[in-house]
Amino acid sequence: MAALIAGLLLMTGCGPKAITVGSHPFPAGNPVFSDVTGKALEGLPEADGAVRFVFLEFPWCPACADVWRAVRTAAAPFSPDTVRIYRVLFDRETVLSPAGRQEVPPLHPAPLPEGGPLEDRGALKVTTLSALPDVFHKEFRVSHGPVLLLLDSEGKVERRWIGFSTGMSRELSSEIRNRSLVLSPRLPGT
């Protein structure tokens, strides 16, 4: 029984310890991201009033695809530009081998968000960033994913999801509806 409790506590302890609800993680004290051009960034690009999520995604993470589906389903009824996703990819992962722990490039390339062509994301606008491996890890102690953060307009973390649950898209849809400037979902076929 003690082993079961210890195991459950260990599993619930995964995820970011420094990025907590109520914190203002970005901008960080040092650059922790790079954008698609390779430019190092301390914070997130502006979102122009959209509901903002930060998705910490790992290439080896099977549940990340489930989180993408939940986000897409939740955002689908809303008008374009309602939701901004900051997709943070990690270009290193820890591999355990007979030689010990090693940081290596991802074993699999990071997939694009699933569902429909890239230009048909509905309400989702995706900004892809890469975490600077050592700096991001030291700053935020993130080692497991997926992690999805909901930010308020000032960048404060209002909610945090670690992992995936079957009710996630319903929760996300409710959060988008409550925070969006345009509260009415778009009509089907528009």
Image (cartoon, grey):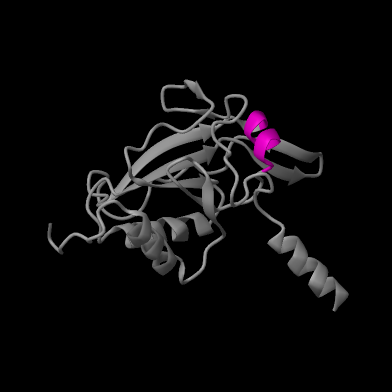
Which region shows up in magenta? 134-141
Viewed as shown, does residue 29 lie left or right of 157?
A: right
Nearer to me, 126 or 95: 126
Residue at image location 49% in from the left, 41% down from the top: 155
Q: Where is residue 118 in the image (x, y as percent from the top left)?
A: 27, 44
Tell me what residue is drawn at x 82 percent, y 67 percent. 6
**Residue placed at 57% from the left, 25% from the top?**
31
In this rendering, position of residue 5 left or right of residue 81: right
Dominant SS in magenta: helix
Question: Residue 20's x, y, as percent?
Answer: 63, 49
Residue 50 vertical placement versus 66 (above, below): above
Furthest residue to the right?
2
Identify whether 66 is placed above or below 20.
below
Question: Relative to residue 127, is residue 83 depicted above or below?
Answer: below
Percent across and percent down for residue 165 are 51, 68
- Front in this rendered view, residue 19 or 55: 19
